[in-house]
Amino acid sequence: MQPFRHHVILCTQQKPENVQCCSAGGSLATESALNASLERHGLSDDVLISTTGCLGTCENGPTMIVYPEGTWYGKVTADEVDEIVVSHLKDGHPVERLARKDEAEVRAESLDHRRKRRGKLAAQDKLGIVPEGAGITETIRSFMASRALLTALELDLFTAVGVGGTAEEMATRLHTGPRATEMLLHALAAMKLLEKHGDEFRNTPNAARFLAASSPDNARPALLHQADLWKSWSTLTDAVRADARVRNDVSHRDAESVRAFIAAMDRNARERAAQVVAAAGADFRRMLDLGGGSAAYSIAFAKAQPELTSHILDQADVVPLTREYIESAGLSARITARVGDMLRDDFGSGYDLVMLSAIAHMFSRAQNKALLGRIAQALAPGGKLILQDFILDPEKTSPLFAALFALNMLVNTEAGGTYSEEEYTEWMKEAGFRTVQRVRLPGPANLMIGEKR
């Protein structure tokens, strides 16, 4: 079977710094150029590209193999991709000067690499050294790059870089120390978020689009929420010892932190809203959106269902922002927002849809049971609850994000956590929902949908 004209395999293996590998040789740029060239020449649907781990020919990388011919190419740079696309993938003529023709040489090279790799792992094992690829050292050190980027976001560095400038000019714009600023700029360049040309630093295309204030796609306000989480996560050791949150100022959010948090939630919600609306599976007229934040889900349901009105309940420091989002969407006549406490205040009744997104993890088991009971009372018979959250599997050791997010709740809430499908199902049925089902969506969050008796 040959469903595609050609199948291209490209090594993108990343290895420790100063170790030869295809990614160090530029295979990611090669991959990007390959996709662009195929699109340009109308071949995107005819050629399948698969990236792979090490092929054992690191010294001659980036390595690319084209099937069905089985042609091996070595040292394929981004500048040479177009020639391969036109000559080989389009016209059927391999590029001889780039093709590796000695099969015995390629085989010996790959097998020798495998022997050396196995020998190195055996030596590390004998000495009791943490082996490369185990993920232990890499995970421990991963905070370094994260902290560098968070600092850049807090300083609004990418906006300051603008059209470019030297380290000294950046320090002046940012009101920061010149020595420290230069170090940070070099680290960001090493992370491929900046480019350095001579003494001048410039934003990469991704940084310019997503991290600078001049871009309509600027995600900095949303991403700044992670900088605030850093402060809480730094207390994790003490929280585990105390079996409770130890950061006392976490509930006292300033206006900038609140805006950043709501922006972060809005970005996530807008990406998923259409899928949630589709999963709901029915027409609704009256919606209650608990902790609706930016109103992203109310807005999505209102746009999909012209007769729907939604009522949002949220905290006093959030509701003014909620109203801004509603007004911007032009839906002030159909979506309202009011201040309230969802654990205590009356919801009203007669709703045929209640949305509870990214809320349950903030509460304890007892609080969630009580909340679900009050939601059931607010729903009309046959009404639906859509609960969206990070849902654990039965053993609570997966998915990884949900397990880690439980720790996020430990350091940021009084009694919150992440819960399993079985727990949500039990609570919802106790509350009066006759059917409960889990709907898996792409990404870390899933839905629990319950229908009232």
Image: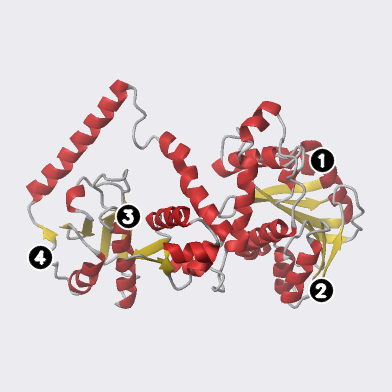
Q: Disc 1 designates what residue?
A: 367
Mark 3 / mark 4, whichever is N-terminal: 3
Q: Earlier in the sequence, mark 4 or mark 2?
A: 4
Residue 334 - label: 2
Q: Secondary structure at mark 4?
A: loop
**Relative image position of residue 377 (x, y in whole percent):** 89, 51
Q: Going from the N terminus, do you reach mark 2 or mark 1 first?
A: 2
Reply above or below: 234 against 317: above
Q: Which residue is mark 4?
A: 96
Quadrant holding the N terminus: bottom left
Q: Earlier in the sequence, mark 2 or mark 3?
A: 3
Q: Residues within 10 Å of mark 4 (few under 14, many from 20)?
A: few
Mark 2 is on which residue type? Arg
Q: How is the image coloured?
A: secondary structure
The three-letter amino acid code for the residue at tag 4 is Glu
| Of residues 208 and 369, the one drawn nearer to the viewer in this rendering | 208
Mark 3 secondary-structure assignment: strand
Measured Cα–Cα span from mark 2 to mark 3: 48 Å
Residue 240: image location, x then y, percent: 65, 30
Which residue is located at x 47 percent, y 45 percent? 144
Q: CA distance from mark 2 to mark 1?
A: 30 Å
Q: Is residue 145 left or right of residue 337?
A: left
* Distance (Cα) linking label 3 and label 4: 23 Å
Q: Which residue is mark 3?
A: 51
